[in-house]
Every structure is written in structure tokens, then in C-alpha cells.
Image: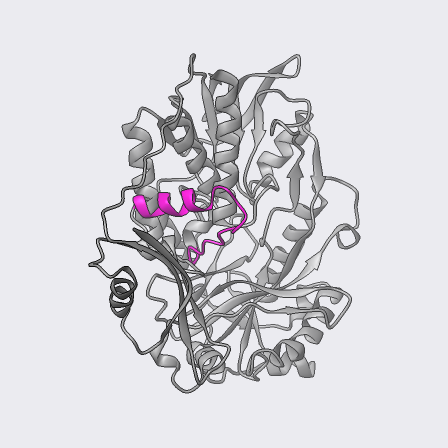
């Protein structure tokens, strides 16, 4: 007999093993099968914080069937440009159907890439082809590894199980807010690559897609790494910072359109302060606290994004002369600070042009302004929240010390952000403080500029997922405007792989 329990609660101080005893009581027999389907922390009542479970159990062994994929009749030559989550998951699924793709990655393997990122932090010398934005694993490889799991997506469980299969913690499958951690994510990505190679796929590093050749609106070949490769299909999983690729696509007649995104800063607090605000005085007994806030205190929506408990703000530039910030946490989330993007929506009216790449130009302008405001050398401009709200410059840090590794310099947000964004952030901070005590505390640090929250363009595609008017070319993932994070990019990679496979079954 198999039983499923939903909304099963467990006081935070109780051990999870007590759930087994509960199941045995309900089954009237020893438990031989036990599986947690979902686990989340309910902290709405700080005096009674509880874990909430959905689980299934049985008094007999239960095995889950392994999916079997039909094999293509004729294996096409498929090239995937980009080895981020969209590209990697696309490659894995194509292999399931018997299609052996060639994966092109402009950056380096994740192990070498990590060394390049550390070198940039230490010396301020940027490698434009291997950094936080470019390289195996994509931009998400240097993040918290958060998996916003799209509860309505049919690919949700498949994605989570795949991450676990390649080395992510088992709890990723069932936590309400699963995260892998940057330290674990690098190992997972390397394991995915090994599987692709082991099943006959190919991965080429330091090999950038530079041209696409079409005849009569159909793909014929691509140019990458100075070589022309014949191809039946091309997957564009290039990431949101592939600005030169967007320019190439536009020059080759692809239909690109502007897309709204968001810009702002990273905000840092003491992690202990966030824990106390969320869980009360006993915060140390719980996982590192996070938050997600939205404000409509002005006409422009402001929200927090990519919150990293116990993490650091990282230098994320991919072009010379520009400062870009992002956030990351390792699996333990045990750093002194919490950080999150604090951003306001921007769109066509802010870009000042109808050109499809006007959003790219807008990003670049802010990044260069931030570089200049901090005096160069990839230092980041910083300001205390209290001084920002009071309209004055900062001169010293309080309890919160910035974690940005390339150094910082005091500069007001007005020096690099548009006035409309500055005004929206200034209105939002007190509003958010009413929702999370201490959010607008004087000593909290604002570090700029957070400019790459998502792609500023969309490469238009049709219902068959192929690019408009370009047969055999498939815009995919966050870079082409069809995802917003690791899990959704992976899901789009799976969708595109299945669309390609269907043509050859």
C-alpha cells in the first residue's frame, strides 16, 4: 500500500526521522519506501516556525520507470552555440534521441574559467572571453545556483532530477527553494560535459560562433573558431551578454526586438540581521534566511532579484571599461553578508531609440558610467542606504562591509543610474523596509551597477521554435529572450531539443 501526505508539518526542532514513525503508524507496517516530494519552511508565525512536507511512503519497495526515448531515423548535424544551462540541457536531451551535437562555447571549461575569474578578482585584468558571463556553465555558474522551478512546467521534475543525477545535493529535488551553490554547480557542469562526451557528443571550448550561412532561408553552415561547419540545425543558446552575436544576427537578417529588463544595484546587509527579521531571535537554528520584495511606491516597479544568503557581490564585467555586479553564494551560505539585486524596470522609453539593440547600448552606457564613477580599475561605486535616502555622499562604512572583490569607491547612484531609476529606488527602500524590518537600515551598502538581470533583446521565433524566416535555427534560453534563470533556461533547452528531434523521428 502506498500513501501520500500533503501539508504535513514538523516543528523546526524535531528530527526528520520522526516522519518515518508517523508513516509506519499510518501504514500499520514497516516503511520500505519513503520519498519527500516537497519541503518548505513556514515562518509566518515566528513563535511557531515549522517545516511543511509533501511525501509518499509504502510498505513495499517501489521503483520508478526510466524514460525511454525513440531514436531518430537519420541523425542530423546539430550545432549548439553556448554551454550554459539551455545549451547543456539541449545537448543532453538530443543525445537521448540519438542525436550527437557539437557544443560550441566561446569561453573556457568551468575549471579553467574559475581560475580566470579568480585572477580577475585579484589583479583586475579582465579576460573578455572567460569571465562570470562567458564560459562553460553560463552566467549562472557563478551564482547561488537557485532553481526557480516553474511549478507549472512539465519539465520541472526532469530538470531537478537531472541536476541531482550529475552531483547536486539530493534535497534539490524537493526543497521549496532549491539551490545548488556555486561550489557544487561547477562540479555538476563538469559532470554534464563528461556525459555529453561519453555518449558521443562534442564540446569545443574557446570557439565562438561568428557567422551563420543560409540559403533560401534555410541553415547550411556556421562559422566558429575560424572553421566552417556544415549543420542541419543550430541552437542559439548564447546567453544574455553575447552582444557581438546579437549584432551578427541582426546583420544576417534575423528579426530581433527590444525587451524590457531591469537595472539598479546590489544591496548588502548582515546575514544575521536578515535572519533576525525573518525568523526572530532564534534565527541561527534555521537555514540562512532569504527574502523577495516588490514595491510599487512609484510608477516604476522595483523588486529584489537573485537574493544570495551568506554570499558575496562579484565583479561580472565581460567588456573592457565597464563595471557589472552580480551575486553568488556557496552551498553552505555561511558568509557574513546577504546580498540581492535591487532593481527597477526599464524599457523602450528609457532606451531612447527604436533600434533592436538600444537596450544593449543602454546597459553599456550605465556600465561605463559606473566604471568612471569609481575611478576605473573595475572598482565598483558604493553608497550607504542612509546617505542615499538623505541625498548625500558616503564617506565611511558602518557594520556592513562590501564584499566586492575588485575594490570600491564612494560615489552616489546619480553618477551612473538614470534619474527615473534613482527616484524609484529611493521610493522603494522605505516601502520595502515596512515589509522586511531593517531593509533600509543606514549601514546597508548599495554597490553598482546591476545591469544584466536578463537579456535586453528577443530573437523572434515561431510556434515551431525556429527563428522567424530562418529554418533550422533555434533561438533558445535566456540570451534570446525565452527564459529568466537557470531552471527556465534548462526547460527551454529541453523544448528546443524535442522540437528538433521531432523532425527526424
**Residue 47 horizontal/vertical position (percent):** 44, 85
**Residue 139 horizontal/vertical position (percent):** 47, 48
**Which quarter of the picture shows residue 217?**
top right
Residue at image position (72%, 45%) is: 358
**Residue 412 horizontal/vertical position (percent):** 64, 73
The answer to whether residue 209 is seen in the rendering is no
**Residue 477 horizontal/vertical position (percent):** 54, 40
Q: Nearer the viewer, residue 314 or 456?
A: 456
Q: Nearer the viewer, residue 370 or 444?
A: 444
Residue at image position (45%, 50%) is: 140
Start and end of the magenta stretch? 143-166
Vertical arrangement, residue 363 with respect to residue 105, above or below: below
Tell me, yes or no, whether the highlighted magenta stretch contains residue 147.
Answer: yes
Q: Nearer the viewer, residue 398 or 161?
A: 161
Question: Relative to residue 44, is residue 330 drawn left or right?
Answer: left
What count of labels does the image hold?
0
Residue at image position (45%, 16%) is: 76
Question: Relative to residue 2, is residue 226 drawn left or right?
Answer: right
Residue at image position (54%, 61%) is: 376
Vertical arrangement, residue 386 with respect to residue 89, above or below: below
Vertical arrangement, residue 189 with respect to residue 494, above or below: below
> Which color scheme does this rendered protein use?
one colour
Q: Nearer the viewer, residue 133 or 50?
A: 50
Tell me, yes or no, whether the highlighted magenta stretch contains residue 251.
Answer: no
The answer to whether residue 341 is seen in the rendering is yes
**Which quarter of the picture shows residue 71?**
top left
| Residue found at the far front of this picture | 28
Amino acid at each position: 500500500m502506498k500513501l501520500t501526505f500533503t501539508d504535513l508539518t514538523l516543528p523546526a526542532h524535531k528530527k526528520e526521522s520522526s516522519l518515518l514513525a508517523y508513516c509506519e503508524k499510518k501504514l500499520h507496517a514497516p516503511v520500505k519506501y519513503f520519498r519527500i516530494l516537497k519541503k518548505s519552511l513556514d515562518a509566518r508565525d515566528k513563535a511557531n516556525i515549522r517545516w511543511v512536507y509533501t511525501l509518499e511512503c509504502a510498505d513495499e519497495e517501489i521503483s520508478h520507470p526510466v524514460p525511454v526515448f525513440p531514436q531518430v531515423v537519420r541523425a542530423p548535424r546539430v550545432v549548439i552555440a553556448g554551454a550554459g544551462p539551455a545549451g547543456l540541457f539541449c545537448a543532453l536531451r538530443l543525445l537521448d534521441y540519438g542525436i550527437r551535437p557539437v557544443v560550441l562555447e566561446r569561453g573556457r571549461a568551468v575549471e579553467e574559467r574559475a581560475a580566470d575569474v579568480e585572477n580577475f578578482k585579484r589583479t583586475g585584468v579582465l579576460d573578455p572571453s572567460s569571465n562570470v558571463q562567458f564560459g562553460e556553465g553560463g552566467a549562472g555558474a557563478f551564482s547561488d545556483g537557485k532553481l526557480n522551478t516553474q511549478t507549472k512546467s512539465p519539465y520541472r521534475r526532469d530538470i531537478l532530477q537531472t541536476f541531482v543525477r550529475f552531483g547536486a545535493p539530493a534535497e534539490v529535488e524537493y526543497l521549496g527553494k532549491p539551490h545548488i551553490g556555486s561550489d557544487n554547480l561547477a562540479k555538476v557542469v563538469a559532470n554534464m560535459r563528461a556525459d555529453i562526451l561519453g555518449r558521443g557528443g562534442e564540446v569545443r571550448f574557446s570557439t565562438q560562433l561568428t557567422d551563420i550561412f543560409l540559403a533560401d532561408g534555410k541553415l547550411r553552415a556556421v562559422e566558429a573558431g575560424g572553421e566552417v561547419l556544415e549543420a542541419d540545425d543550430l541552437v542559439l543558446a548564447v546567453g544574455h551578454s553575447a552582444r557581438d552575436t546579437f549584432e551578427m544576427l541582426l546583420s544576417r537578417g534575423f528579426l530581433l526586438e527590444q525587451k524590457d529588463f531591469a537595472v539598479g544595484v546590489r544591496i548588502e546587509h548582515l546575514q544575521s540581521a536578515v535572519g533576525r527579521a525573518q525568523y526572530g531571535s532564534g534565527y541561527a537554528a534555521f537555514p540562512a534566511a532569504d527574502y523577495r520584495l516588490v514595491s510599487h511606491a512609484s510608477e516604476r516597479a522595483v523588486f529584489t532579484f537573485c537574493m544570495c544568503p551568506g554570499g558575496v557581490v562579484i565583479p561580472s564585467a565581460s567588456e573592457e571599461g565597464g563595471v557589472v555586479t552580480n551575486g553568488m553564494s556557496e552551498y553552505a551560505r555561511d558568509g557574513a553578508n546577504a546580498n540581492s539585486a535591487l532593481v527597477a524596470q526599464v524599457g523602450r522609453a528609457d532606451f531612447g531609440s527604436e533600434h533592436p539593440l538600444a537596450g544593449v547600448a543602454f546597459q553599456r552606457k550605465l556600465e561605463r558610467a559606473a566604471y568612471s564613477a569609481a575611478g576605473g580599475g573595475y572598482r565598483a561605486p558604493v553608497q550607504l542606504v542612509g546617505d542615499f535616502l538623505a541625498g548625500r555622499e558616503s564617506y565611511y562604512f558602518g557594520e556592513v562591509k562590501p564584499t566586492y572583490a575588485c575594490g570600491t569607491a564612494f560615489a552616489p547612484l546619480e553618477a551612473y543610474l538614470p534619474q527615473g531609476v534613482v527616484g524609484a529606488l529611493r521610493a522603494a527602500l522605505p516601502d520595502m523596509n515596512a515589509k522586511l524590518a531593517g531593509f533600509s537600515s543606514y549601514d546597508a551598502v548599495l554597490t553598482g551597477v546591476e545591469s544584466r538581470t536578463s537579456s535586453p533583446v528577443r530573437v523572434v521565433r515561431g510556434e515551431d521554435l525556429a527563428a522567424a524566416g530562418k529554418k533550422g535555427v533555434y533561438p533558445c534560453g535566456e540570451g534570446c529572450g525565452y527564459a529568466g534563470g537557470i531552471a527556465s533556461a534548462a526547460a527551454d533547452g529541453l523544448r528546443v531539443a524535442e522540437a528538433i528531434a521531432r523532425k527526424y523521428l
